[in-house]
Amino acid sequence: MSTSSASSMLLFILNIIHVVFGLAITCTAIWFFVEVHNITSLRNANHYLLDYNVYWPQAIPWVFILVGVLVLCVSCCGFVGAKKKSNGLVVMYTVFQVTTIVALIAAVVVALALADSSSTDKFIKDTIWDVYGTMKSDPTIETPFGTMEKRLQCCGASTPRDYISWRREFPISCCDTNYHGFLGSYSIDCDFTNKLANERHGCAEVATNYTRIVIRVLSAASVFTAFIGLMNVIVAVTLSKSVSKKPRMPPQEYESKKVLL
């Protein structure tokens, strides 16, 4: 197997890994944005009429979405260059790949230096508390807030005891309403003595921790994707050199035959 063929095959394999991680970053960032939007959409809109700021939990998903899409687009260029073994396409791919690596590293720096901070914690906690306060006067918020409690396995804003001042018992979303015992499942009461509900953390704490975890996971995935991109650059340069060194066939000369009329 020639050097160009081996480099072409290796570049194709590395680009498959690149696409997988680029797709994972993009999908995770979209999911993260939707989750943040689902929480912020429950806030009392009157409290944010003059608040035009964009906070990092709202902005950082878009940063990772953009770099994820960039990874996917550049990988498509790499597939074409690896298949056609065109020196021009491979050089163009190398330039785009270097740009992608810079973008990935920049996204990680922004995420860890700015988004993974106390300002993000404050935004999430303030949002949860605002939704919880709105729920007291707006019963329509209780169902989506309960859905969030079920998903995050949390109860109340800061602690399950937040419900004591205005409810007679915990909401069902704080409890496992069906106990699965030896004789089957049966319903249990979700009162203030329920052990499971009292052991749960508040939603502000849980949501804050999950936000930090997602930001760090996206950052780690971006660092690994940048490393794969660096390997792609090395292989692409090798492929470009091997393609440019291919001997060209000398042009064939044909003797012109004069035809006497």
Image (cartoon, rainbow, N blue to C red):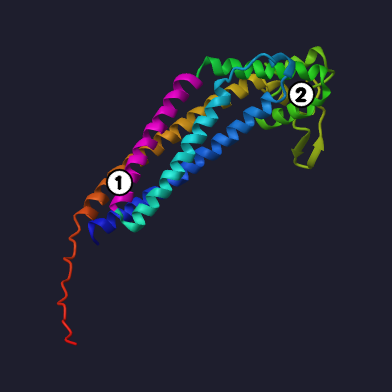
Amino acid type for the residue under numbered disc 1: Val
Q: Main secondary structure of the magenta part?
A: helix
Residues in magenta, as a range: 87-116
Closer-to-camera residue (249/186): 249
Q: Give the image location of residue 13, x and y in percent.
A: 37, 52
Vertical placement of 73 versus 113: above or below?
Answer: below
User: Is residue 104 rendered magenta in the image?
Assistant: yes
Whether residue 15 sits left or right of residue 251 in the image: it is right
Closer-to-camera residue (258/157): 258
Under circle 1, the secondary element is: helix
Residue marked by disc 1: 91
Q: Give the image location of residue 134, x and y in percent.
A: 77, 18
Amino acid type for the residue under numbered disc 2: Asn
In the rendered structure, which disc, 1 or 2, sits on the residue that comes first in sequence?
Answer: 1
The mark tally for this picture is 2
Residue marked by disc 2: 194
Whether residue 114 sits left or right of residue 256 in the image: it is right
- Considering every residue shown, the one lying at the far right of the view is 168
